[in-house]
Image (cartoon, grey):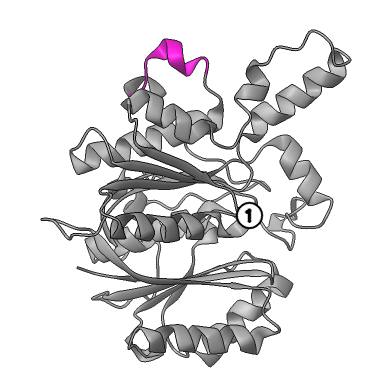
Amino acid sequence: MYIHSTGNISPQHSLDSDAFFLNQITSSSNAFKAIEPNYDSFVDSKMIRRMSRIVKMGVAAALTCLRNAGIENSSAILTATAYGCLEDSSSFLRKMIEFEEKMLSPTAFIQSTHNTVGAQIALLLKCHQYNNTIVHRSFSFENALIETSLLLEEGVRPILVGAIDEITNDRHAILSRFGLYKPGWKNGQPVSGNIAGEGAAFFLMDKEPGYHPLALIRDLRILYKPENNEAVNTEMIDFLKSNQMSPKEIDLVLSSHTGNPQMDAPDEKLLQTVFPGKSFFPFKSLCGDFPTASGFALWLAVHLLKEQKPPSWMKGLILPLKHIIIHHRDGNTHHSFILISSC
């Protein structure tokens, strides 16, 4: 699958690639919030007031992607999300409690469904074509890419596919009880754990290279509940072999390091065993940890391959870059490998 354009709203300056390559944004809190643009340049201000935050992010990222491609519409829209519109869900549940389940407005409930973002994009574009939302926890974006490849084989092209999730105070508080996220900072240093993140990344995909493709997705594989770390390493080697490649040919590994030593141990083992001496970068240090963070990782890989220059804050990157592999991991249950190459 060829990637022809992108649009990304994240905790970094990802809407402006020049600013992104010059400045790395870091978080001093336990949540990595997205840098949001002026939405008036994307949607009429009257409509913006009726949109929740995640819908605005998704719409802006999708419209940016289409604008960068120089087209007004796509033949299909695929949206991947694990949690959907959490802000509206929380609002609806709070109102149920506040009004004792009486005199409830249906608006918050209608806008809380997972497919709200994809539906809003279609309404704005007046796109009456195929539209689907994939909700499959940490494999949501990966399954959206698989469905994209199937649609392309059927002749549907081009396809707008995106990954989007948000962090809210309620979600952060609930998941923090399980020890997933950092409880905060102590003496100026982060307490061991993950930093929660969010973002909206969209891509325009096509089966044909066209005139100026940004990158090529060569293959994708998902692995659920491996028996042990060695099983992950073996699967990675087999994945490369199936693409007639060896670990030596990989120029950069984008890993899922989060800053949690216990959870990062499998990543360290994979790098030492399969990719010894290879350049790697923990992409979640830029976007935070969330189920569809692989969307941000794909955006990062695409722009590194396109620009062929190291960001001022990324050390040890060896050019030129031809092949990048993304290892997206959520806990020790969800693993995915995405192989991206320059065109």
Identify the residue at the far right of this view. Answer: 100
Residue 82 lies, with reference to residue 233, above or below; the image says above
Give the residue at x 60% y 25%.
111
Query: Residue 300: x and y, percent?
Result: 38, 59
Residue 339 appears anywhere in the view? no
Q: Which residue is mark 1?
A: 137
Left or right side of 265 for 5: left
Dividing the picture into quadrants, the one containing residue 101 is: top right
| Span shown in magenta | 42-50
Residue 78 lies, with reference to residue 40, above or below; the image says below
Query: Residue 11: x and y, percent?
Result: 50, 45
- Element on which disc 1 rests: helix
Q: Please identify the quadrant where the C terminus is shown.
A: bottom left
Query: Residue 159: x and y, percent?
Result: 31, 47
Q: Please identify the quadrant where the N terminus is shown.
A: bottom left
Dividing the picture into quadrants, the one containing residue 129 is: top left
Residue 165 appears anywhere in the view? yes
Residue 181 in magenta stretch: no
Give the residue at x 47% y 88%.
238
